[in-house]
Amino acid sequence: MNEEQASVTLTINGQKVTVPRGTTVYNAAQKIGVGIPIFCYHDRMPPFGACRVCLVQVEKMNKLQTSCTLEATEGMVVHTESNLAVEGRKGIMELLLINHPLDCPICDRGGECPLQENTIKYGPGKSRFFEDKRRFEKPLFLNSVLALDRERCIVCARCTRFGEHVAGDSALVFKERGFKTEVGTPKGKEAESKFIGNTIMICPVGALTSAVYRFRARPWDNETTQTTCSLCPVGCSLLLDERDGEIMRTRSCENRAVNDIWLCDKGWFGYEFVEHEARLKKPLIRRNGILEEATWDEALSLVAEHLKRSKPRGAIAALGGNALTVEENYLFQKLFRDVLGVNNIDHRLGQTILPLESEGISAGMEISIGECEDLSLALFLGIDITEEFPVIWLRIKLALNSGGKGIFLGHFAPEIDIHLHEVHLHAPGQELETLQLYLDALRTHLKAAEGKKCAVFVGKQYLASNSRLQVLAVLLQLKQEFPHLSLNLLEGKGNSMGARFAGVHPELKAGGEQARSPGLNAREIIEKGCQAGWDLLYLAGSNPAALLPLTWKILRQNISFLVVQDLFLTESARDADVVLPALAIFEKEGSLINIEGRVQKVKAGKVLPDSIYADGQIFCSLAQKLGAFLELDAQFLFALEQEKIFLTRATSGMEVKNSTPPAKRHLQATFGSSLFDRGTRMQHNPHLLELVKEPTVRLNPADASELKIECGERIEVKKDHTVILSTAQVDPRVARGCAVLPLGFTEMPFEEMNIALINGFTIEIVSGGIR
Amino acid sequence: MDEMRVLLAHIDTPNQTAIDTYIAGGGYKTAKNAIGKITPEQIVTCVTKSGLRGRGGAGFVTGKKWSFIPKNSEIAYLVCNCDESEPGTFKDRLLIEKDPHLLIEGMILASYAIGAKKAFIYCRGEYYEGMATLQRAVQEAKQKGMLGENIFGSSFSLDIVVHPGAGAYIAGEETAQLNSLEGFRATPRLKPPFPAISGLYGKPTIINNVETLCNVVHIVDRGAEWFQSIGTPQSSGTKIFQISGHIQNPGCYEFPMGISLRSLLDAAGGIPQGRTFKACYPGGSSSCILTEQDLDIAMAFETLEARKSALGTASVIVMDDSADMVKVSHRLMQFYQNESCGKCTPCREGTRWLVQILARIEAGKGTLYDLTMIDQICDQMSETSFCPLAVGAAFPIVSTLKEFRAEFEARIRCNPTYEEEPKMKISYPYLSKSV
């Protein structure tokens, strides 16, 4: 295509503008700053043309045209301010307003409402409507976080189209027709989505509002701070809105490289814990068996004394770090490595725990999250993407919308499987076999996509399996064959990438350097604790008592002194000797590293509570009491100045072997995470907590009928001597011979079955307990 | 004037719905002689030459529509629009209930012409009998080898699916019908792309009315010249006129295009005794009203267009001097209000507002100011709506108001404050009553 054909020149209000062919008149007008109001059009979704407010007059066309749907053509002459266009627009504004309640003074959207703003700019200024307005019972809670005021709705369909085009969950649909049209959910059930908060943002009126933020503040009273979400390794850009020292809400902040303009619902509504009344406000010291409030000096002195006392024997271990900033993690490991001389420090409790030599390649991405939009092939290897890396799915969905292929291989189908072209299920233990069987088909796909971007996203089902090294070897070989294939290993939690980089890892020091004398990893710390015990165990935002309640009973007895540093009096903190309150991520400054290795800043978005210190400050104070001086060294800080940190990815110890699939007589277990689990912070987000689904063990219907187990039946899950009571869910989306064990629920601590969370072990399921 | 029955020739034949009766009367002969014997292009050319215009209301030249299907498209679909929901329209119902095989034969020819291997009949949900008849007929045709693989020993295969609608006027709009067929809400799609390029499931699709497809059989059988010789130069062929309302013998009457309105009314027995003709909507309710002065108008696409009305589906809704035009307008607008899909603002909000105003006028509480407003709202609706539904809703009201303004004004004068501009009534959504 030559230059002339690739672009067109049109005239808008007498001004010439050249735009690429295929650009709409609306976007052409945007380019030269000509204002046109819009409601239904949203630049992240295909044009719809329903609200009709973006009308313009085009010469040689006999009717007014909607600029959001009209493609600009060569020589087109457009008028946005001609009498005809202005009158047409006013007419539409009048029609939009006749049934809109105009309750702006009490509407959450007031002050940041596109309808309000466009009414002022383009509206008729006077209404001729004297009839009765449409009325609905209000509000309607579509789920625990989303409220709908139907009479405010202007039926722009942004929210329903979001579910269709962006999230792919079709959580909101239209009901009825004509003037009775209203937004609802399929079958009138609670809206089921992980991304529903986005619909509030794109609603051009106050019809959809946040049940958490509702009636709490006016937008002009809020002070906004830009920060980064720390709840999962995607690291979406966030805006924190604070009013009178309290966090009122979080919003998404546009970041084309990571989250675009979207967030998941944890990002939208997962901030209530910060202001929760159960937050620890003062240090606690156990006196006569009871935890009592103490001063910081008392608490820190006591901890320092015990650290000093335990130092010579070296029976000290520390867990935690995912909820801390990179800088704090650095200080954390420095305190233990340099000041106390122990390497028993790990951030991975509740994640896959593998020694370096069994890792092959570590977590990370070769493409940026933003690039996922351009993929022509996305191969998901055992990853439940919406549960673990939700916003990455939104970017990949865009690629699938424009013709990209999606293929899944794994133990159980992800909820977004209807958007994928192929889904192949197999039992745990058959990862390598399945991948090898699929290789030829994959090669064909990759050949067809030559010169385009292709990516493989490997998740927990493959990475935390016994065939990890072989699978990675196959993938590396494939990558050599097809250089346009990128290899992305998605595993981790919170700021786990940052914790690893900072050296909260028994084998790795800060910056990724291997420690000369490796310490024990999280699994070994727990196991050794149960046997030999620890003189001192230090938990910074880690909660083993909730993850491993059965083991904890034994472990706790063997710990002479337990220090817990957290936001809340967690299960572990209840058993502690000293509890140190810490600041939440929205209350401190520092950096996070996301799954791509991108370094992003967090900033305090509110007035800091008195008497609570950041984790980093606590480590420094402790060091001081021990006669040492902790600081961030310049080289480390310099490394954090980069946009992205490329972690050293060793590629050793991998070879392609032919697999020998295990006997398929027994049920093989795999782990499934949920975005909405009952972790410590989730428990203190009352609205979000209601979205948590009751955990179940999922089974293939054929296995269930073989075991004579019905859906909803109470079951006992057994592995060796561990028995955990649960509920069975019969689900055809699970592979034959596979049982999916939920993670993140204290009442069903399946973490007990394999502390390192390696899947592919045999379990027994029997019917049991009361239904 | 006598009827000229071409499409309706066999509707009185006993047991015409049975395939054997249909074949005995010469049925499927045309398809048999055409499929595999002449090329699809020849059929397209023949239909184009005949000047056949779509019978669903818009009157687009059928052959031209067919020619928009991209050459060499691997998959194409034919959809027969049998969602006959326009008030006053009931011709398709007669055809599918009385002579379903004529439609199937027409669909075979049309599918062959456009290269469709699968065709759908989107049937109005309320046509239970018609749907059952069609389903039976499709089944019979399959058993007899008229449908299925390698029809008449040719390489051409066709499957027909009868799909029930769920009762929505808007599903008659072609792109809304495609959405409904795909299982989505029946709301119109953005055009372009036009269905002939990207229609059902994103594939090239032709949507034709039942009567259009039935005509195809006779055109292919008797030739384009024969068809052209009937009717007017721009509206060739015969047309099934449906006459309803204040008329002696309401029903379907087939005449050549261009018959005068007066002859048509006479054929249907005229206005009931003691009454006089007042007005009629000539092409379903979405056309501009005709009055006594128009009785000699020729019922054809071009003549009614010139009169700023439309032939539409040729459904003549007759009103005698007992008709209350305010009530008529109100009732019609209620129909459009209830049938608006709600997608675009002008239609969704405009129709409801008009119903509210017309109800007020009918109740004797209107003002003169309302009449100007009706005109302005209708203008806004027809100028800015997404699809033709709102245009069709505005036509009858604007024209009725124009022709019978005196009647509206007389009703308005019942209101003692009819000359005053209404004042804003503040309504609080949180109180049960407005203040």
Image (cartoon, rainbow, N blue to C red):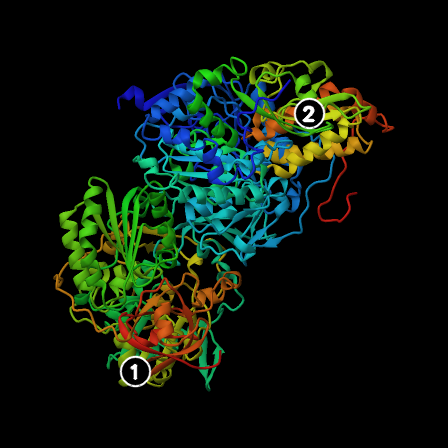
Can residue A259 be seen in the rendering of this structure? yes
A546 to the left or right of B209? left
Local packing at callout 1 (Cα closer than 10 Å; few below 14, some 14-19, many 20+) is few
Q: Which residue is under mark 2?
A: B268
Instruction: Please name whichever residue, B182 or A425, is drawn nearer the observer in this view of the structure.
Output: B182
Q: Mark 2 or mark 1: which is in front?
A: 2
Residue pictured at 73% horizontal, 19% vertical:
B403
A159 to the left or right of A417? right
Q: Position of residue B22 (x, y in %)?
A: 48, 35
Instruction: Please name whichever residue, A558 or B92, is drawn nearer the observer in this view of the structure.
Output: B92
- Secondary element at tag 1: loop
Q: Position of residue A313 (x, y in %)?
A: 24, 82
Q: Position of residue B212 (x, y in %)?
A: 49, 28
Subunit of label 1: A
Q: Residue furthest right?
A: B416
Subunit of label 2: B
As shown in the figure, which amino acid type bears the numbered disc 1?
Asp
A88 to the left or right of B376? left
Answer above or below: position of B296 versus A159.
Answer: above
Q: Which residue is under mark 1?
A: A720
Q: Position of residue B287 (x, y in %)?
A: 63, 24
As shown in the figure, which amino acid type bears the numbered disc 2?
Ala
Number of dots carrying numbers: 2
Tell me where residue A588 sits by quadrant. bottom left
